[in-house]
Amino acid sequence: YALVALSFSGAIGLTFLMLGCALEDYGVYWPLFVLIFHAISPIPHFIAKRVTYDSDATSSACRELAYFFTTGIVVSAFGFPVILARVAVIKWGACGLVLAGNAVIFLTIQGFFLIFGRGDDFSWEQW
């Protein structure tokens, strides 16, 4: 059930993003560049998980650096549509829809890691 719920929430987030681009009042597709931020946001976590093998340690410099880079990517994804709206490339309504889509998609990514990323026997080949 968890994978279906995550898929559904991801589809809702992408729907918000597409509505912010494709509605007749907005019609500008520049906000689709936030998909790059969505795609690269888990990469620091993957690298840190691969490099740090001891999961017993409460903190490591590599993991903290990965949190820092991930936070920068997420903040950039929320800042990009605001900057586009501020310089009048997109309308503020489109910015709101893109920000709503960002929130849903990043919560979906976080939910994926909370649900599927905790076990030691986790592997991508299990589905």
Image (cartoon, helix red, strand yellow):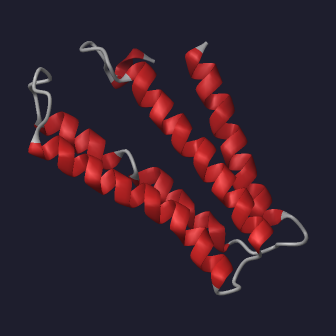
The C terminus: image quadrant: top left
How far from the left and from the top, in percent, is residue 119?
A: 30, 14
| Total labels drawn | 0
For residue 78, above or below residue 53? below
Residue 4: image quadrant is: top right
At x 27%, y 12%, the residue is 121
For residue 3, above or below residue 50? above
How far from the left and from the top, in percent, is residue 107?
A: 54, 38
Camera-side residue: 64 or 15?
A: 64
Single out the residue that lies furthest toward the front. Answer: 58
At x 55%, y 58%, the residue is 35
Residue 64: image quadrant is: top left
**Relative horizontal placement of residue 47, taking residue 34 as reference (left or right):** left
The N terminus: image quadrant: top right
Camera-side residue: 57 or 113?
A: 57
At x 36%, y 20%, the residue is 125
How far from the left and from the top, in percent, is residue 45?
A: 28, 41
**Relative horizontal placement of residue 64, taking residue 35 as reference (left or right):** left
Residue 85: image quadrant is: bottom right
For residue 44, above or below residue 49? below
